[in-house]
Image (tube, rainbow, N blue to C red):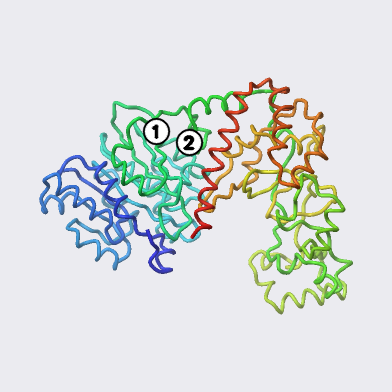
Amino acid sequence: MKPVEKYNKLRGGYYTPAEISAFIAEWAIHRPSDQVLEPSCGDGSFLRAIADRIQMLGGTRAALKRNVIGIELDHAEAQKAEQHGTTVICEDFFTYYEKQIDGKVQFDAIVGNPPFIRYQNFAEDYRQIAFSLMNQHGFHPNRLTNIWLPFLLLSCKALKPGGRVGMVIPAELFQVDYAAEARQFLSDYFDKLTLITFKYLVFEDIQQEVVLLFGERRSTEQGIRVVELNGLPDLIKQGQACFENTEVKRLDHSRDKWVKYYLSNEELELLTRLNADPRISNAADLFVVNVGLVSGENAFFIANQNTVQEHHLQACTLPVISRSEQLKGIQLTDGDYLNLIAAGKKVFFFFAENVPFDELSKEQKQYIQWGEAHGFHENYKCRIRPNWYHVPQTWHGDAFLIRQAHRYPRMILNQTDALVTDTLHKVQFLDGAQGTHIAAAFLNTYTFALSETIGRSYGGGVLTFEPGEIRKMRIPLKLAEKLDLQQIDAWQRKGQIDQILACTDQVLLRDGLNLTEYEITLLHKIWDKLRNRRMARKNQKNKR
């Protein structure tokens, strides 16, 4: 599926591989008389597959024209789609849905690949109609809602009681908070829901993982199943047979992200039991977490020693950590900070009081004028401040948390009183919480396994955590006082995570929680499976 010019990227339009379109059409369309909707048909990849399927079932051209509707906003694409013999409507899907479908028409099958457009790029006129329709059907969209979500949910609402939906959906469905309501709805609305996922990216040139969603409103088989394939060749090879022999997973759809569907029921049961274990501490009971400084322009506010000396800023800078790669261990010491300075790292934060320009020092004024000459004051975050050169601050962090993890998340004790930018999160320990124990105990296999089900991962394979997700983390702290912080820090600096886990798992999981070796091994398996799955996409990207 290749983007065809920047225009297509902006409108969320990408071509679906013919093999996927044919696969979904074969699954969804059972009779030549089926009434079929393609809500975002583009140039007609799905319409071609639908026409082939209906003709194979003995349908006539007249029936194809009468029973199959494709909708496409772009006039040029709609003209291309018309060649496949179906009815093609050149109009916004939501406008057409409101006028012609909602409460008036139902379909046997709805198939397609909805556009992927974020809220801020979603044309306001169409967004208002889409969100109004969602509200009418009991959904609650917000400013994070991507356009694919109303396409999917409203399409489901247009199905007949025995209807089927087959769609290419971003894997965001599995993990983002704004899709939580959709996950609950889909699990309730369909008797049987099957999700085909891929270990490797199947659409060329875009770093967007997708899943194939197959919903059946009426089925003797109940529940949700996940089929995981390596890639498009695997789908072609297995064909419809890949639906066979899948395991129904038991999840709490009101809380769990669907990334857990990659786990076996045995693995899910272990996580469920540990997640309810009162001996394991909730992160929210140990510390508060928030984003770091949002400067609005790091090129101005974050400097290295050469810049500080060049502009004579020694009296108006504060220590700051600006990148996660500057943190090697699980503590940031004064020695570490001095080493970063010597290495030329950007670890100085330009600080000016929130006062009129005339009240600043000569050095501050000159540096601010230099920044304005480069246009830094025009950046949005700077522009909306009373004084663009003053970055608001809240509390200093007792520790930092990696916001975008590669192999695993990590907490770093802040022993230098440094600030931190929003590339990381800052932590403040609550009264009675022992920060040294928490930082050392954070590196254990249970917390790692849990983190893979809490964070979110996109095409590049990085595991990302927002503050709300960090608050859902859990850390076993029983016997944590026996952990040697300095030794764990030394191991971390050398990249020796296996040695760390051998120690922390023994103390925290085996001795502290009385887990068996088999259970600890199973936690390793969960972590390995989910981590390797997301990182395989990163490795695939690097090979291109």
Residue 31 seen anywhere in this rendered image of the structure: yes
Q: Position of residue 478 (x, y in %)?
A: 75, 25
Snapshot quadrant of residue 107: top left
User: Which of the labelled discs sits on residue 262, or is there none?
Assistant: 2
Q: Position of residue 353 (x, y in %)?
A: 83, 64
Secondary structure type for disc 1: strand
Q: Is residue 455 left or right of residue 87?
A: right
Q: Earlier in the sequence, mark 2 or mark 1?
A: 1
User: Which of the labelled discs sits on residue 200, or is there none?
Assistant: none
Q: Position of residue 310 (x, y in %)?
A: 83, 75
- Between 347 and 34, the residue placed more toward the observer is 347
Q: Amino acid at mark 2?
A: Tyr
Which residue lies most toward the bottom here? Answer: 373
Q: Quadrant of the N terminus?
A: bottom left
Q: Is residue 58 left or right of residue 238?
A: left
Secondary structure type for disc 2: helix
Q: Position of residue 474 (x, y in %)?
A: 66, 33
Residue 106 seen anywhere in this rendered image of the structure: no
User: Which of the labelled discs sits on residue 225, or is there none?
Assistant: 1
- Between 488 and 391, the residue placed more toward the observer is 488
Q: Is residue 129 above or below residue 491?
A: below
Q: Residues within 10 Å of mark 1 (few under 14, many from 20)?
A: many
Q: Amino acid at mark 1?
A: Arg
- Say if mark 2 contacts mark 1, CB within 8 Å: no
Snapshot quadrant of residue 7: bottom left
- Between 293 and 123, the residue placed more toward the observer is 293
